[in-house]
Image (tube, rainbow, N blue to C red):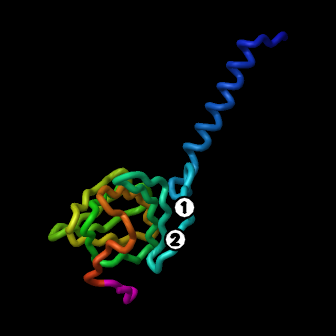
């Protein structure tokens, strides 16, 4: 059988499709894509900055089972959380909710909030920050399980 240029092109596309399909089947708790900063470890888990630009930052956050972040607020940014894997317990102002995979919530600027993993598997979420200042020192902690200031 003679294989012409069109057949080679079709074969190449089939191989690429197979690779994309295999990638889609990988665990959602594993990093997919490029991470622009090293992973920063915290007592509750870790985070990585995926992308950052003027007025926004995108993070991948992992919270270990049974752990939670401090009850905190930010003066200069809002946050949007999208659950990728696991279960999130969210406190935002006076509201408390449980989020599952593919659910999200919005945390307005200057609103006390907390993120917790009540589940048995690692919680993975994408956080999109928006605001005039996105530094890690814009955290006002009201309560913290790890005695951080």
What is the secondary structure assignment of the residue under circle 2? strand
Within-10-Å neighbours for mark 2: few <14, some 14–19, many 20+: few
The residue at 27%/69% (across/down) is 74
Q: Is residue 104 left or right of residue 39?
A: left
Quarter of the rendering occupied by the C terminus: bottom left
Q: Is the magenta stretch mostly helix, strand or loop?
A: loop
Residue 71, placed above or below residue 14: below
Q: Is residue 1 magenta?
A: no
Of residue 80 and residue 6, the one placed in the foreground of this image is: 80
Q: Is residue 148 left or right of residue 74?
A: right
Q: What stretch is highlighted in magenta?
A: 144-149
Image coordinates for residue 62, horizontal then vertical, percent = 46, 66
What is the quadrant of residue 24 in the picture? top right
What residue sits 41% from the left and 77% below the top?
66
In percent of the image, x 47 and y 73: which residue is there? 45
Most extreme residue toward the right, as rendered?
A: 1
Residue 76, percent from left and from top: 27, 65
Assess whether mark 2 and mark 1 are in contact (beta carbons under 8 angstroms).
yes
Residue 146 against residue 47 in the figure, above or below: below
Residue at (22, 72) in percent of width and height: 112
Residue in the foreground of this view, choosing between 138 and 29:
138
Residue 99 position, x and y percent, is: 31, 60
Q: Name the residue furthest left.
A: 94
The residue at which mark 2 appears reads as 40
Point out residue 48 in the picture as x, y percentages from the top left corner.
50, 63
Q: Which of marks 1 and 2 is in front?
A: 1
In the rendered image, which residue does mark 1 sit on?
A: 37
């Amino acid at each position: 059988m003679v294989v012409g240029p069109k057949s080679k092109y079709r074969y190449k596309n089939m191989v690429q499709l197979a690779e994309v399909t295999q990638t889609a089947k990988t665990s959602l708790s594993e990093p997919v894509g490029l991470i622009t900063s090293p992973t920063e470890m915290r007592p509750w888990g870790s985070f990585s900055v995926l992308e950052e630009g003027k007025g926004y930052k995108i993070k991948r956050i992992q919270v270990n089972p049974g752990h939670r972040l401090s009850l905190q607020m930010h003066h200069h940014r809002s946050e949007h959380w999208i659950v990728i894997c696991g279960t999130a317990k969210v406190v935002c102002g006076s509201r408390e909710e449980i989020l599952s995979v593919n659910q999200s919530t919005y945390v307005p600027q200057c609103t006390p909030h907390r993120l917790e993993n009540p589940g048995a598997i690692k919680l993975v979420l994408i956080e999109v920050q928006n605001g005039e200042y996105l530094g890690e020192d814009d955290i006002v902690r009201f309560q913290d399980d790890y005695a951080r200031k």
